[in-house]
Amino acid sequence: MVVKAQCKGHRVTGLRVGAHNVRRYFPEHITVIELQLGHLHIHCELAPDFWQGKPEIKDPRLCAWLESGHLHARPCGTPIPLVMIPSGKNSFKLESTYLKGKPRTTQASSPAAPALPAAQTTRKARPSSPVP
């Protein structure tokens, strides 16, 4: 799912999940989720207003992680898109939508969509036919 880091001034204030994503990916009325931020794992509380039309995750550790270099020099005030991948019960992996400075073009795998084995993901080159 695509989520957006929210900024106010030069500070990240939270992670906007969106009402559609809440209905689709979050079991009703859970109060805590686990976020995997690279090698860091944190538990974030979901405020009651998360379920009442303000689906934003606010946690100072999450904001610090985003501010520490995961915003890719985007101007603050502009929502920054990120990918949040379900990775277990009430657990999500947060990743940038950019890989090495380039937009992510493939969808990341999740438990609901397992990755294909390497032999099935590569294509064999066709021999080219001579042009008359």
Image (tube, rainbow, N blue to C red):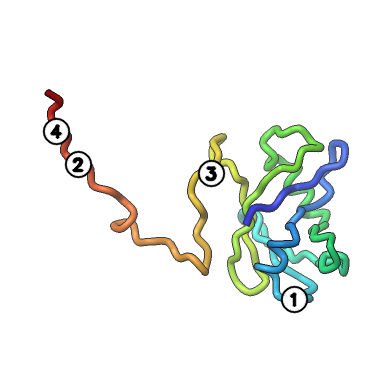
Q: Which mark is first along the chain, 3 or 1?
A: 1
Q: CA distance from mark 2 to mark 1?
A: 50 Å
Marks 1 and 3, how far apart in space?
Answer: 30 Å
Earlier sequence position, callout 2 versus callout 3: 3
The residue pinned by badge 3 equals 104
Q: Nearer the viewer, mark 4 or mark 2?
A: 4
**Callout 1: 10 Å neighbours few (<14), some, many (20+)?**
few
Vertical relation: 131 (above or below) 45 = above
Q: Position of residue 51 (x, y in %)?
A: 82, 68
Of labels 2 and 1, earlier in sequence is: 1
- What amino acid is at disc 3? Arg
- Distance Cα–Cα, label 4 vs label 2: 9 Å
Cβ atoms at labels 4 and 3 below 8 Å apart: no
Residue at image point 60% right, 60% down? 85
- Label pair 2/3, CB-CB below 8 angstroms: no
- Give the secondary structure at mark 1: loop
Q: Amino acid at mark 1?
A: Glu
Residue toward you, 33 or 108: 108
> What is the crowding at mark 4: few (fewer than 14 residues within 10 Å), some, or many (at least 20)?
few
Q: Is residue 34 left or right of residue 125?
A: right
Task: Tell which tag, 1 or 3, sits nearer the viewer.
Answer: 1
Task: Report the residue marked by disc 2.
Answer: 126
Residue of label 4: 129
As drawn, 11 above or below 44:
above
Sequence-wise, the earlier of marks 4 and 1 is 1
The residue tagged 1 is: 28
